[in-house]
Image (cartoon, rainbow, N blue to C red):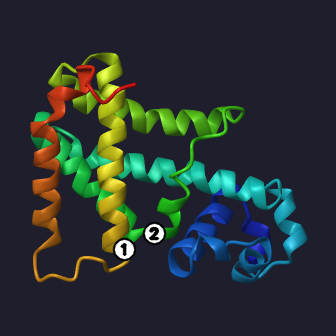
Amino acid sequence: MSPRAGLDVDILVRAAAEIADEEGIEEVTLARLAAKLGVRSPSLYNHINGLQGLRTQLAIYGLGELNTAIASAAEGLSGDDAVQAMGRAYVEFARSRPGLYKTTLSSPDPNNAELVAASERILSLIINLLQVYNLGKEGELHAVRGLRSILHGFASIVQEGGFGMPLDTNISLSRLIAAFLTGIGQMNIPGKYES
């Protein structure tokens, strides 16, 4: 069976994710994807709406994979243990799937219901993990932003090889999350730094 006969959106997205992870998200082009699949670029249009459509599908797939990774890690846990496990899984996903991870970083296009839903599943998961801290709705959202910033920053520095000291980065990450959780109660208290 030729590769053309078996093409569908799922195959295209998975192949694009491989390119993104191995070569960088910038290398995900229709020409590169067609070459990887052994087809001509025009045949991709039967399944996706151009490069932008491919990137949107890639973001939906990336968000789904990230959600699966962090949900699996936190399953059956609660409180600090759940947040620690989720955090480690998040950083590991960013490390092991660097191109796909990059597709998850932008705010979703509000006009794309599938993309918004994929993003909201992750947000809901993290909010559920944070509910035990009694932060209130607004405090939970601030906490999600803070936690995401910490995890993204840490993952980015690890990815770039920025931690050169001979210390276990897993221990550093665990301590960083623990420090965040120690101060998490401040997320529902308006601070003096707010304007």
Residue occupying the point 17% across, 49% down: 177
Locate residue 133: give its quadrant: top left
Q: Distance between the residues labelled 2 and 1?
A: 8 Å
Residue 195 image position (x, y, % from top left): 40, 25
Q: Which of the 4 quarters of the picture holds residue 39?
A: bottom right
Mark 2 crowdedness (10 Å alpha carbons): few <14, some 14-19, many ≥20: many
98 left or right of 175? right
Label number found at residue 98 = 2
Q: At which x and y percent is residue 159? A: 36, 74
Report whether 176 appears left or right of 8.
left
| Quadrant into which the N terminus falls | bottom right
Q: In this view, does 147 lie above or below 184?
A: below
- Report x, y in % for residue 4: 79, 72
Judge whether 187 appears above or below 169 on screen: above
Q: Which mark is residue 159?
A: 1
Instruction: Compare marks 2 and 1 and give the one earlier in the sequence.
Output: 2
Report the amino acid beneath label 1: Gln
Q: From the image, state whether disc 2 or disc 1 is nearer to you.
A: 1
Which SS class for mark 2?
Answer: helix
Report whether 48 appears left or right of 136. right
Residue closer to the observer: 47 or 73: 73
